[in-house]
C-alpha cells in the first residue's frame, strides 16, 4: 500500500510539472497580448475623441479669424457661441483674454475664471492646449481642447471644447472586462487540455514503471505496453527485450545446471560403482582391480576435462583468458593432432584423413589453445559420425589467412540449430555426452587469435567447420 501511495504522488508530480509549464507559458502569452490590446484600445478611443475636438476647435478658430477678427470678442461672444455649438455635441466655451469665461453652451458657469486650467493658459498664450483630468467643481473626468482666437496676430481669447470621458471610460471598461473574460476562458481551456494531454504521457510512464517494478521483483513474464511509437514506446521495447534476454539467460542457466549435473553424475556413478565393487569383492583378483582402477582413472580424466572446460568458459566470459603466443609449425602441429585421434577413429571404424602440405608458413598462435579447439572439433565429428563414415582434417593457406578445416560425413546439424550451436550450453537436439560449451569456447579462442570460425552443415550429409587464422 505504501508503495502505491508513493507512486501516485510521484506521477501526479510529473503531471503537475507538465501542466504547470503549459500554464506559465500560456499565462505570460495571454497577459502580454491582453495588455497590448488594452493599451491600443485605450489609445485609439482617446486619440479619436481628441482629434474630433481638435478639428472642431480649429474650424471654429479659423471661422473667427476670417469673419469676426475686427469685432470685439466679449460683445460678439453669444453669437459666436451659437455658431460654434451648433455643429458639436461637446460643451463649448468662449474665453476672454484673461481667462474669464464669456460664454458657455451649458449656460451655467459664465463669468467664472478658467485660468487654472492648463489648456486655457496655453490658449491665451497663443498655443493650442489639451488637458485631461478631473473637472474642478464636478470632479468629472473630462477632456478639454482650447484653441486661441486671434485677430491680427493678437490672441484676443480662446474657444474651448470640453467633453466628459465618463461614458468612454465605461465603454473601455466593458471592453477590458470582455478581454479578461476571454483570457480566463483560454487559460481554463488550456488547463483542461494540458491535464488531458499530459495524461497521455504520464499514463505511459506509469505503465512502464509498473512493468519495470514487476521485473525488479523477478517476474520477467510481464510485457511493458507500447502505446505510441515515441521514446516511451522504444523504452517499452527495450524493457521487453531486456526481459526476454533475462528469461533466455535463466533458461540457459537452468539447462546448464541440469546438463552439468548430468555430466558429473555419469562418471561419479561409475567411480562409485567400481569403488564399491572393489571394496566388497572377496576374490583377490588382480585383473578386476586393474580394470576397476583403469575405469576410475578415465572417469576422473573426464571429470577433470569437464571442470577445465567450465574454468575456461568462465575465464573467457570474464575476459581473463590470456593467450600464450609462440611460433607454431602448422604442418607438424596438424599431423600431430591427426596421430593423437587416429586410435579413437579406428575404434569407431571411422576413416580419419589428414591433408597438409610441407611448405606451410610458421604462424604466431597459442599452441595449446589451438589444439584444444581442433580436438573439440574432431571430438564433435567423432561423436556425430556413424561407423564407416569419414573425417577430413585439412590445412591450407591463402595470402591473408591460414585455413584449417574439419569436415565429416556425420549426421549434420539441423538448420534451426545451426544459428545457435555457437551459443554457450547449446546442444540442440543432441543427446550425446557434452556440456554444449565446446564450440562456444572454440569460437572465442579463435576470435582471441584475431580469426573467424565458420560452420557449414547439412542434415544427413555432414558438417564442415572452417577456421581462418591471420598469418
Ligand atoms: N560435427 C557435428 N555434427 C553434428 N552436430 C554437431 C557437430 N558439431 C556440433 N554439433 C551440434 O552442436 C552442438 C554443440 O556442440 P558443442 O561442441 O558446443 O557441444 P557438445 O559437443 O555437445 O559438448 P562439449 O563439446 O562441451 O563436450 C552439439 O551438441 C551438436 O548438437
Ligand atoms: Mg563438442
Image (cartoon, rainbow, N blue to C red):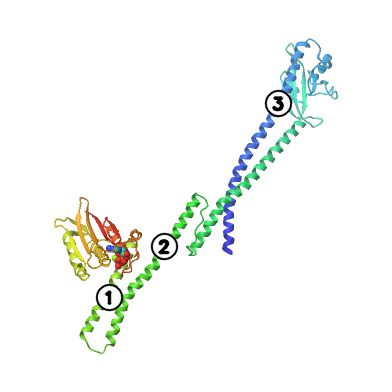
Residue at (80% x, 20% y) in the render:
85
Instruction: Give the mark toward the camera: 1 or 2.
Output: 2
Of helix, strand and loop, which one carries label 2? helix
Q: Earlier in the sequence, mark 1 or mark 3?
A: 3
Q: Is residue 143 above or below residue 284?
A: above
Which quadrant of the frame does ligand 2 lie within? Answer: bottom left
- Please name the residue that numbered disc 1 is placed on: 300
Q: Which mark is residue 469?
A: none
User: Label 1 crowding class (10 Å Cα cut-off): few <14, some 14-19, many 20+?
Assistant: some
Residue at which label 3 appears = 48
Residue appearing at x 81%, y 23% in the figure: 113
Q: Position of residue 130 (x, y in %)?
A: 72, 24
Vertical position of residue 355 compared to residue 76: above or below = below
Secondary element at tag 1: helix
> Closest to the observer: 57 or 360?
360
The earlier-in-sequence mark between 2 and 3 is 3
Question: From mark 2 to mark 3, how far is it between C-alphas?
Answer: 82 Å
Is the CB of mark 3 within 8 Å of ligand 1? no
Task: Tell me if I can see residue 329 in this picture.
Answer: no
Amino acid at each position: 500500500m505504501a508503495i502505491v501511495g508513493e507512486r501516485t504522488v510521484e506521477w501526479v508530480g510529473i503531471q503537475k510539472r507538465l501542466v504547470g509549464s503549459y500554464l506559465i507559458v500560456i499565462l505570460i502569452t495571454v497577459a502580454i497580448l491582453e495588455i497590448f490590446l488594452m493599451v491600443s484600445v485605450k489609445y485609439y478611443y482617446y486619440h479619436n475623441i481628441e482629434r474630433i475636438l481638435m478639428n472642431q476647435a480649429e474650424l471654429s478658430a479659423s471661422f473667427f479669424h476670417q469673419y469676426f477678427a475686427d469685432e470685439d470678442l466679449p460683445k460678439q461672444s453669444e453669437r459666436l457661441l451659437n455658431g460654434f455649438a451648433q455643429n458639436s455635441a461637446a460643451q463649448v466655451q468662449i474665453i476672454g483674454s484673461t481667462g474669464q469665461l464669456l460664454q458657455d453652451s451649458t449656460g451655467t458657469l459664465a463669468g467664472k475664471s478658467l485660468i487654472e486650467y492648463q489648456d486655457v493658459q496655453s490658449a491665451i498664450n497663443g498655443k493650442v492646449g489639451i488637458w485631461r483630468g478631473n473637472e474642478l467643481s464636478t470632479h468629472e473626468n473630462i477632456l478639454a481642447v482650447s484653441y486661441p482666437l486671434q485677430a491680427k496676430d493678437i490672441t484676443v481669447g480662446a474657444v474651448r471644447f470640453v467633453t466628459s470621458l465618463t461614458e468612454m471610460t465605461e465603454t473601455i471598461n466593458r471592453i477590458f472586462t470582455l478581454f479578461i473574460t476571454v483570457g480566463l476562458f483560454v487559460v481554463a481551456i488550456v488547463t483542461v487540455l494540458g491535464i488531458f494531454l499530459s495524461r497521455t504521457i504520464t499514463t505511459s510512464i506509469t505503465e512502464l514503471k509498473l512493468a519495470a517494478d514487476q521485473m525488479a521483483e523477478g517476474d520477467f513474464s510481464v510485457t511493458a505496453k507500447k502505446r505510441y511509437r515515441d521514446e516511451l514506446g522504444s523504452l517499452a521495447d527495450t524493457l521487453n527485450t531486456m526481459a526476454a534476454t533475462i528469461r533466455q539467460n535463466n533458461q540457459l542457466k537452468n539447462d546448464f545446471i541440469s546438463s552439468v549435473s548430468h555430466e558429473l553424475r555419469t562418471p561419479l556413478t561409475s567411480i562409485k560403482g567400481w569403488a564399491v565393487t572393489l571394496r566388497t569383492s572377496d576374490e583377490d583378483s588382480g585383473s578386476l582391480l586393474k580394470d576397476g582402477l583403469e575405469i576410475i582413472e578415465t572417469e576422473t580424466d573426464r571429470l577433470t576435462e569437464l571442470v577445465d572446460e567450465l574454468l575456461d568458459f568462465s575465464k573467457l566470459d570474464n575476459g581473463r583468458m590470456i593467450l600464450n603466443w609462440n611460433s607454431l609449425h602448422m604442418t607438424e602441429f596438424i599431423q600431430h593432432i591427426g596421430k593423437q585421434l587416429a586410435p579413437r577413429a579406428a575404434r569407431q571404424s571411422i576413416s580419419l584423413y589428414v591433408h597438409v602440405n610441407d611448405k606451410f608458413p610458421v604462424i604466431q598462435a597459442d599452441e595449446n589453445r589451438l589444439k584444444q579447439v581442433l580436438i573439440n572439433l574432431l571430438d564433435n565429428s567423432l561423436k556425430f559420425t556413424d561407423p564407416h563414415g569419414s573425417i577430413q582434417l585439412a590445412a591450407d593457406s591463402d595470402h591473408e589467412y591460414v585455413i584449417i578445416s574439419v569436415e565429416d560425413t556425420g549426421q549434420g546439424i539441423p538448420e534451426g540449430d545451426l544459428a545457435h550451436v555457437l551459443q554457450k550450453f547449446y546442444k540442440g537436439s543432441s543427446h550425446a555426452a557434452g556440456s554444449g560449451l565446446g564450440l562456444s569456447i572454440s569460437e572465442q579462442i579463435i576470435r582471441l587469435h584475431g580469426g573467424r570460425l565458420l560452420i557449414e552443415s547439412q542434415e544427413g550429409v555432414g558438417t564442415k567447420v572452417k577456421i581462418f587464422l591471420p598469418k
